[in-house]
Amino acid sequence: MFLVPFWEVVVVKKLLGKLFGKNSDRHSPEIPTKPLPPEAGPIQAALTFEPPQLIVGCAQSAGRQRDHNEDALFMLATTFTSEARNIPFGLFLVADGMGGHQYGELASGIAIRTVAAFIIEKLYTPLLSLKPVSPEESLQEIMHTAIQEAHRAILRSTPGGGTTMTAALILGNQLTIAHVGDSRAYLSGSNGSLEVLTRDHSLVKRWVELGQLTSDEAAVHPQRNVLYRALGQGEPVDPDLRTTQLPQAGRLLLCSDGLWGVVPEIEINHIITHSPTPELACQKLVEEANAAGGPDNITALLVRLPG
């Protein structure tokens, strides 16, 4: 098992002051008061907590039918607060080494390290500079180059190895996803919805898109784990990229197919929305995948978004 630790910088501002109620002492003199007009509405104490924060949790398991873990993950959640600005920064990566290929566990680890190092050098480190400079490339261009760098690193270091890669970058109010393979990113909305943000690069998914298989048939097809796009496999690699406005609330889930392939999405969303913390949600998701047989490695990484 390969697990990259994360660092989280959280700035907390204390709220000062007390709210006093009416003195109910029977010896206190009564003070006549005039009722507020109806249009005034109820009196409420305005409470504002800053800065916005990314709360993260994760969990992994080799599963019940594998003797080692070929999944890898990385998470970095930071909040920059200065000059009356709050800038959340998050980088979250999940890679699933291809068990049918040599050195799958090495490929996933190399991919995680390469992408994380590239993004940190290009975006995270400049944010710590006394004079931050905006990168010349767009976020999508930076993510695309990071994926290409990981692909080339695998080809050099572990010929024959392969891995998926699902990467989520949060910078300010933007969310950028880069994706190769069949790990997934989900957005669980504050309204109870669950949206898949990625497209599986598997043969059966492609056959479903072409109308040659139904979704039910694809779920039990013997070639459902065969990918037509993965890091370290073939040239060139072309990741899916998308950038959207960061939702004001909700949860972002990154996971390997050892989770979504055995736990129904309705159950995944129920666990996400009813768990008190992302960490406990991920632990419960892994438990459910193992309870369903645990046929593959399992990785879950959950981010609670600000709002």
Image (spheres, helix red, strand yellow):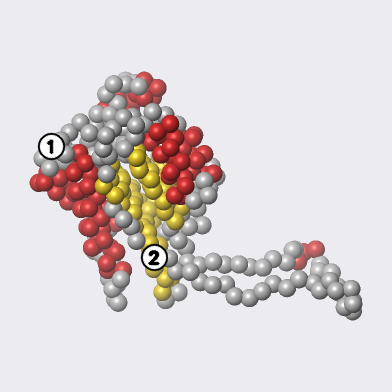
Q: Is residue 169 visible?
A: no
Does 274 sit left or right of 21 as displayed?
left
Q: Position of residue 62 (x, y in %)?
A: 31, 37
Work out whether residue 202 or residue 5 is closer to the camera in this orientation and state it: 5
- Cβ–Cβ under 8 Å for marks 2 and 1: no
Residue that appears at 76% across and 71% down:
21
Q: Position of residue 39 (x, y in %)?
A: 77, 64
Q: Amino acid at mark 2?
A: Val
Work out whether residue 185 or residue 260 is closer to the camera in this orientation and state it: 260
Residue that appears at 47% across and 66% down:
51
Q: Position of residue 40 (x, y in %)?
A: 76, 66
Tag on residue 144? none
Q: Which residue is mark 2?
A: 9
Which corner quadrant of the image does residue 94 belong to? top left
Does 301 sit left or right of 230 as displayed?
right
Q: Earlier in the sequence, mark 2 or mark 1?
A: 2
Does 49 sit left or right of 228 as displayed?
right
Q: Residues within 10 Å of mark 1 (few under 14, many from 20)?
A: some
Residue that appears at 81% across and 67% down:
37
Q: Position of residue 125 (x, y in %)?
A: 27, 67
Q: Residues within 10 Å of mark 2 (few under 14, many from 20)?
A: few
Q: Find numbered disc 1 in the image and state the secondary structure of the residue it sits on.
A: loop
Q: Which residue is mark 1?
A: 160
Residue that appears at 87% across and 78% down:
28
Q: Find numbered disc 2 in the image and state the secondary structure of the residue it sits on.
A: strand
